[in-house]
């Protein structure tokens, strides 16, 4: 193993876990386009290389979903919808100090 510092100021994890409707899960409730919309917004702001947008599996807080978590700032965004993208970008702006 080689231990390194993350190259990103912020890494945003979008929970994409699906349980096929058997139990509440972000992947069943969220908009499948959210990741691409966020990635485009990050790119449009010139933050590529500073901010990484990734899908994750379950973040452990399913009942509050759809969920996003931002590290290393330890920010949890619950009940997220595609309409929240401008506010998410404002949050990221604060995170990276732009
Ligand atoms: S399914 Fe998203 S937090 Fe568990």
Image (cartoon, rainbow, N blue to C red):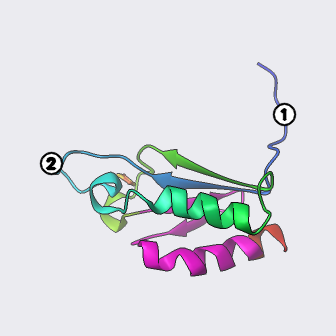
Name the residue tied to disc 2: 22
22 part of magenta stretch: no
- Which element carries disc 2, helix, strand or loop? loop
Query: Above or below — where is 74 with respect to 27?
Result: below
Residue at the (69%, 63%) spot, across then down: 42
Residue 51 appears left or right of 31: right
**Above or below: residue 93 compared with residue 50:** below
Q: For mark 1, what is the residue? A: 4
Quadrant in the picture for residue 9:
bottom right
Give the camera-side residue of 41 and 25: 41
Q: Quadrant of residue 92?
A: bottom right
Q: Residue drawn 80% across and 43% down? A: 6
Q: Position of residue 10 (x, y in %)?
A: 73, 58
Q: CA distance from mark 2 to mark 1?
A: 39 Å
Residue 68 within the segment the image draws in magenta: yes
Secondary structure of residue under mark 1: loop
Seen from the viewer's position, the closer of residues 47 and 4 is 47
Tell me what residue is drawn at x 79 percent, y 51 percent. Answer: 8
- Give the residues drawn in magenta, as a range: 67-93
Return the x and y of residue 11 as percentages of the image width and height.
67, 53
Q: Quadrant of the N terminus?
A: top right
Q: Pointers 2 and 1 in contact (CB under 8 A)?
A: no
């Amino acid at each position: 193993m080689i231990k390194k510092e993350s190259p990103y100021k912020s890494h945003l994890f979008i929970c994409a876990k699906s349980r096929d409707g058997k139990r509440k899960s972000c992947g069943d409730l969220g908009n499948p386009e959210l990741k691409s919309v966020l990635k485009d917004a990050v790119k449009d702001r010139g933050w590529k290389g500073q901010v990484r947008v990734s899908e994750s599996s379950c973040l452990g807080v399913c009942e509050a979903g759809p969920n996003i978590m931002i590290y290393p700032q330890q920010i949890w965004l619950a009940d997220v919808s595609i309409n929240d993208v401008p506010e998410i970008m404002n949050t990221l702006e604060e995170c990276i100090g732009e």
